[in-house]
Structures are given as C-alpha cells and as structure tokens.
Amino acid sequence: MLKPTFRDRLARARRAVRDARLDAMLVCPSADLLYLTGASLHMRERPIFLVITPARVTLLCPRLEAESSSRVLPGIPVWEWPDGDDAFAMLREKLGKARRIGINSTMRADWVISLLEGRPHARVRSAAPVMVTLRSAKEAGEIRRIQAAADQADQVMGEARRRLKAGVREEELAQWIMARFEKLGAVNPWALVASAENAAMPHHSFGPRKMRRGDVVIVDLGAELNGYQSDITRTFFLGEPEPEAWHVYDVVRGAQFAGRAAVRAGSPGRSADRAAREFIDRHGYGEFFIHRLGHGLGMEVHEEPNLDSSNRRPLPEGAVVTVEPGIYLPGRFGIRLEDVVVARKGEPRTLTRFPLDLALIK
C-alpha cells in the first residue's frame, strides 16, 4: 500500500474532484503526480496517467510498464493496454458516460484530441484549480523540507558573498554556486549573477562580464533538496556604488517588508503585491518595478499561488511564497531582494534568513 501521506492526499483529491463537479481528473507524470503518489513516473510517447474519480483512483499505463508502475504505486489498480491497442479507446470505455473531465497542466495536446474522439458531449476542463487547492496549503512536513532547503540556500549565499571580488566573472561565480549546491547534496541547482547594467535585466542569468569596484550585483540562487526547492535573492555592492543605489536599496527593502507583512492566510495574493507596489510607487519608482511580487514555492521553483495583481484567491494557511520586489533602472543597475515566506493567520513566517544588512562588500 501507499504510505499514509499519499493515501490521504489521494482521498483529498477524490473529494476535490467531486467538489469541482468533475466526473474524472487525469494526471500525467509531473510534479502533480509526484505530489499525489510519491511516484516519479516519466512522460513518454505512450499514454500514462492517474485517473481520479470521486469514487476511485486507477492508473492507465502500457502493459510493458505495468509491473514497474505497480511497484512504485502499490495498491492502486492498473488498466494496462498492450502495444498496438488504442489506449484512449480503453479509457473511454472505462470512463463510461463521464462528460466533465479535468486534465492537469502537463497533458499533451494530442492526447486531449484522442480523448475526445467519439465523445462529442464530453467537456475537458483544466484541473489546475483542483491541484492548486491541494498543493498550495503545505503540510507541516513539507514546510520542514522547504526550511531545510532555505537553510542550505542561506549558507550558499553567504559563501558566494565571500567570493564576490573585482575581476571575478559572473559566469565563474554562478558555476561555483551550482557546484557548491551539488557538493552539499542538492540537485538541479541554478544561479543568476547579474552585475552593473546586467542587473537592470531581471532575467539576466550570467555572462563573461568581469565585476568591478562600484558594481551593483544581484545574486539569485536555489536548488532542490529532498524533493523541495529553495529560492533567495540578495543584492550586493562591490565597494561604494553610485549614491542613488543606496536609496533604491532602501526602497526595495521597505517594499519587501510591506509585502512580507501582507502574506497572510485568508488574504488574496494580490494584497501582498499591492502592498509592495504601493510602497515603491510612493517613492517614485513604480514604473521600474516590472514583475509580480512573487510566486509559490514547493516541489517546483515556480508554482501556485502567485502574488500578482490578478490573484483574488485567498492564500491558504501554510502557503509558501517568495516575496521579491525589484527596481530596475535600464542601462544602470537593478536591485532585487527575495525571501521565502509562509502564510499564516497571524504573523507570516520567513524561512530564508540571510541578513539584508550585508549589502556592502568593502
């Protein structure tokens, strides 16, 4: 049998499918499937997905993978189909008169077309709202894992700061960060290092530019530890920067405090975005804050819920999000500060702890 955690998640998924008035939900290999079952199956050319109805959970998979799939999904019945047969004909037969079918976000378009063949009255809907409801409210064990990942990211950020020197290339530091994460036992590490005018581009990754005294440097990094992600950004001054940089830093820092304070269970995601954005607007830099305030963090680096102006959904207790306001002055510099925060009914809890008062590197 599956572990109790996953049995509970599948039970909640069945209830969520019922509450969404779906006859069935199909979940392809993805972070969604991993969350629900703990099984890391792979998306291949042969259809394979979990079929969840209000009454039961079944796995549809090719016969050649049935045994291996049963081992990682013990206790879940399998509908197996042999090579050469039409997997979707089997699925249509098994689903019977089901008309309202939800699909998760990784479903291939050609599979959707095959699913609908011969079923003119069937309606396919996005199952994203169902999965968002399930995954957004993090369990205590998930938050402990994210905290461990955040602690590791704090450590790597501190070590990276000590390596920031004039003459070091952006790519050199970024590659060191990724190698350091791997040495500490993390997987899938990534890093953005952007200096001077490159820091004015929010998604600049890294390049051959050598850093110089007086540069503003954004360092954004993270990795996966025990199945959960980290994400933190700090901005450093490699020696005294131009005078406005300190002022902008203070504005971004104030906006981050305002945004973090607004990450509360029961408040819509847009409230935190608005709090940070209004702070920056009041200081005259509104046109230079050009992205959302943050995003959900968990098994994926970017997942729901988002902190943006369109998100009216209340944040659930235990939602884990990033809070990362930034100001980007084209051709000059940019400043971004990012922390990972847990939404609670009372004071939000910040998981990343690297100090914000260590910007200046003398």
Image (cartoon, rainbow, N blue to C red):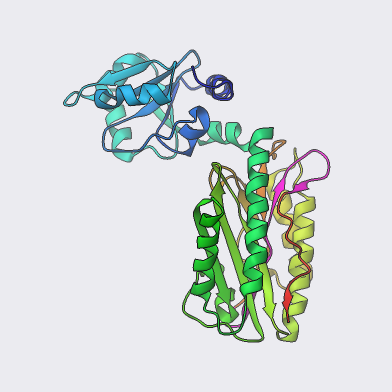
Q: Position of residue 140 (x, y in %)?
A: 69, 33
Between 169 and 125, the one nearer to me in the picture: 169
Q: Position of residue 194 (x, y in %)?
A: 56, 73
Say above or below: 362 vs 194: below
Looking at the image, how many numbered discs can be counted on the residues?
0
Between 19 and 211, the one nearer to me in the picture: 211
Residue 212 horizontal side relative to residue 99, left or right: right
Say above or below: 166 vs 45: below
Verify whether residue 132 appears in magenta: no
Verify whether residue 342 appears in magenta: yes
Residue 64 horizontal side relative to residue 189, left or right: left
Residue 254 horizontal side relative to residue 129, left or right: right
Between 180 and 242, the one nearer to me in the picture: 180
Q: Position of residue 298 (x, y in %)?
A: 59, 43
Looking at the rendering, the stretch of residues picked out in magenta corresponds to 330-350
Say above or below: 154 vs 32: below
Q: Quadrant of the C terminus?
A: bottom right
Residue 281 image-quadrant placement? bottom right
Q: Position of residue 52 (x, y in %)?
A: 45, 21
Between 206 and 316, the one nearer to me in the picture: 206
Q: Residue at x 83, y 40 (%)?
A: 346
